[in-house]
Image: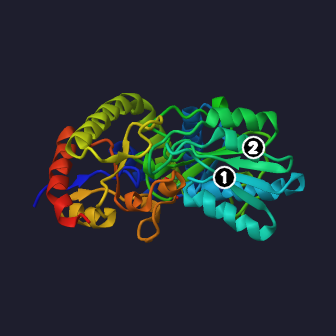
Amino acid sequence: MRRRIYLDYNATTPVAPEVLEAMLPFLRDRFGNASSVHWEGQVAKQAVDDAREAVAAFLGVEPREIVFTSGGTEADNLAVQGIARQYAWRGRHVLVSAIEHPAVLEAAKALRHEGFDVETIPVTADGVVDLDRFQEMLRPDTILVSVMAANNETGVIQPVEAIGAVCREREIYFHVDAVQAVGKIPVEPRRWGCDLLSLSAHKIYGPKGVGALYVRQGVDLTPILYGGFQERGRRSGTENVPGIVGLGAACRYIAERWMAEAERLAELRDRWEAELRREWPDVWVHGQRAPRVPNTSMFSLPGTDGEALLIRLDLEGVAVSTGSACSSGRLEPSHVLQAMGVPPEVVRGSIRVSLGRDTTWDDLATLLGVLREVVGAVGG
Ligand code: PLP
C-alpha cells in the first residue's frame, strides 16, 4: 500500500512531539485540580499560568486577557453571544461576514431568537469582505462585528485592520476568528484593533478540544457557561490542564517555526497551482487574486464532482477536503464559495488542499498524478 499523504492541515494537524512531551506529565502524575489550594492543585495552577503566559506572549497581549475554552467553537460562541448579551442595552444589531465559520454564523443566528438583528456582510468574487458594503451596513445600534482573519476554505486573508479601525472609531465591539490565521500570518490583536480574538490548539500542532479567547482588558462578557467561576467567571468548569498545557506548548512551537514554514509552504503552493493550471487550463483557483495564507489552495475542476474526487483520492491514499472540513458530512455546498458568487456547477467540483509540516513537493506531485488518473473516471 502506498504511504498516505495528508493534505488537510486546515481540518486538523498532528500533535507535535514537543507538545505531547509537555502534556504527558499532566496526564500521568500531575493530575491536580488547578482550583485546589493544596500542593497538587498549585502544580496544576502553575502549569495553567505558564500556558496563559505563552499564549499571551504569542499574541502580544496580557495573560489576564486570555480565557481558555474547549476550542475555537466555544471561543467564537463566547465572543459573539457573550458580547451581544452583555451590551444589548446599547443596541441589538450584529454584523458577521458571510464567510464566517459556522461557529460564528450559527452562534449569531441563534441570537435572532433573543431579538437581535443579525446581518451578514457580503464578500467580493475574490472572497474578501466588501469594505464599502460593510460601512454602509453599520447603524447607530450596531454593537458587534465579527470577521475572521483568514478563511478556512479559501485561505483568503480579510482586511481586519481596516475593519478594526472603523469599529474603534464608532465604539463597536470587534471579534476576529483567527483560528486559521495562527501559525500562517502574524496575528496581532492590538494592531488589528480587535476586542476579542479566537484561536484553537489543534490547528497549530496542539491537541483537540482546547482553545482560547483573547478578551481586551475592560471588555465584559456575559458567560455562556455558569459554575465554579474559573477563568475569572468568564468560563466556568474545571480547567483542562493537559489541554491548556498543550495549547501553551503549541504556541511556543509555532512561534519558533511559522515564518520559515510560511515561506516554504507558499513556494510549494505556488508551484502546485502553476502545475494545476498547466494541466487543466480551465481550473478555478478560488481567491487567487486576493492575499491568502500560504498553505491553502482551493480549486475547482469544472465538470467534476468534488465529493466523488475526494473519495477516489482517499482510496488512492491522499487526504484532501471539499469545502470546510468542519461541515463535511453535510451535503450542502460550500457557503463560502456561494457567497463569492461561484456558479453551482463549479462549487460542486471544489477541492481544498491544505499543506503543513510534513508536506513535500513529492506529495503534491503524487496528488497531481492521482488527479490525472481519477479526473477522467469521476468527471461529469
Ligand atoms: N473557526 C474556524 C475559522 C475554523 O476553521 C474552525 C475549525 O475548523 C473553528 C473556528 C472551530 O474550531 P474548533 O475545531 O477548535 O472548535
* Total marks in image: 2
Residue type at numbered disc 2: Glu
From this viewpoint, is residue 233 visible? no
Residue pointed to by mark 1:
96
Label 1 residue SS: strand
Residue type at numbered disc 1: Val
From this viewpoint, is residue 199 visible? yes
Tell me how far mark 1 sits from mark 2, CA to CA. 14 Å
Residue pointed to by mark 2:
136
Q: Residues within 10 Å of mark 2 (few under 14, many from 20)?
A: few
Closer to the camera in the image, 306 or 54: 306
Q: Quadrant of the C terminus?
A: bottom left
Q: Residue at image x 68%, y 39%?
A: 132
* Position in image of residue 200 (x %, y %): 51, 50
Please identify the quarter of the rendering in which residue 270 is found: top left
Q: Name the side, left or right, on which 319 lies relative to 151.
A: left
Q: Is mark 2 within 8 Å of ligand 1?
A: no
Label 2 residue SS: helix
Q: Residues within 10 Å of mark 1 (few under 14, many from 20)?
A: many
In this rendering, is residue 122 above or below 209? above
Question: Going from the N terminus, do you reach mark 1 or mark 2 first?
Answer: 1
* Position in image of residue 223 (x %, y %): 74, 59
Q: Name the side, left or right, on which 11 lies relative to 335.
A: left
